[in-house]
Image (spheres, rainbow, N blue to C red):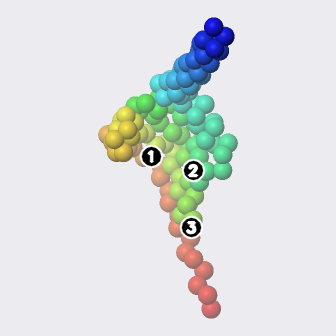
């Protein structure tokens, strides 16, 4: 009897954690506020790219404003970056992008110093 109760409690807790994780993923992917939370979390990390704001949802079409990236000697920025994609394709190890629109792009490459 006691073992069944313990097992029921453990299964209920595991089920609750899984349901909460699924709800968080749905919130981030399918809502505009979730996309803003994801952008905020990404901007807090020391990643080579960041953006000022995002609109749309990460599950289909989103627009980033004030994008800046630095990869080694390459500095890039864009006033606006709009992407339409199918994230479900990631399950098949594919990236399916339907459209990308970049406005106000600037790219600067700093040449490496030549030793004397």
Dot 2: element: strand
- Labels 1 & 2 near each other (Cβ < 8 A): no
Report which residue position mark 2 lands on.
Answer: 49
First of labels 1, 2 by sequence position: 2
Specify whether residue 27 is in view: no
Mark 2 vs mark 3, CA separation in Å: 14 Å
Q: Tell me residue 52's x, y (percent).
A: 60, 40
Look at the picture and state if 115 lies above or below 96.
Answer: below
Q: Which mark is residue 103?
A: 1
Which residue occupies the foreground of this view, 55 or 43? 43
Task: Point out the image quarter for the N terminus.
Answer: top right
Give the class, few, some or many, for how many residues have Cα within 10 Å of label 2's Cα (few <14, many ≥20).
Answer: some
Total numbered labels:
3
- Is mark 2 in CB contact (under 8 Å) with mark 3? no
Separation of residues labelled 1 and 2 (CA atoms):
17 Å
Earlier along the polypeptide chain: callout 1 or callout 3?
3
Q: Is residue 60 above or below residue 19?
A: below
Instruction: Give the quarter of the image for residue 86.
Output: top left
Residue at image position (34%, 41%) is 92
For residue 74, above or below residue 83: below
Q: CA distance from mark 1 to mark 3?
A: 22 Å
Helix, strand or loop under label 3: loop
Q: Which mark is residue 73?
A: 3
Circle nearer the viewer, 1 or 3 = 3
Q: Is residue 51 left or right of residue 86?
A: right
At horizontal 44% and vertical 46% (from top left) the residue drawn is 103
């Amino acid at each position: 009897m006691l073992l069944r109760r313990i097992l029921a409690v453990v299964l209920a807790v595991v089920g609750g954690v899984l349901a909460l994780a699924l709800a968080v993923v749905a919130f981030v992917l399918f809502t505009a506020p979730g996309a803003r939370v994801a952008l905020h979390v990404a901007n807090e990390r020391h990643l080579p790219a960041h953006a000022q704001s995002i609109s749309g949802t990460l599950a289909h079409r989103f627009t980033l404003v004030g994008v800046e990236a630095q990869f080694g000697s390459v500095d890039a920025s864009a006033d606006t970056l709009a992407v339409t994609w199918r994230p479900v394709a990631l399950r098949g190890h594919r990236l399916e992008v339907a459209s990308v629109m970049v406005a106000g792009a600037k790219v600067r490459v700093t040449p490496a110093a030549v030793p004397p």
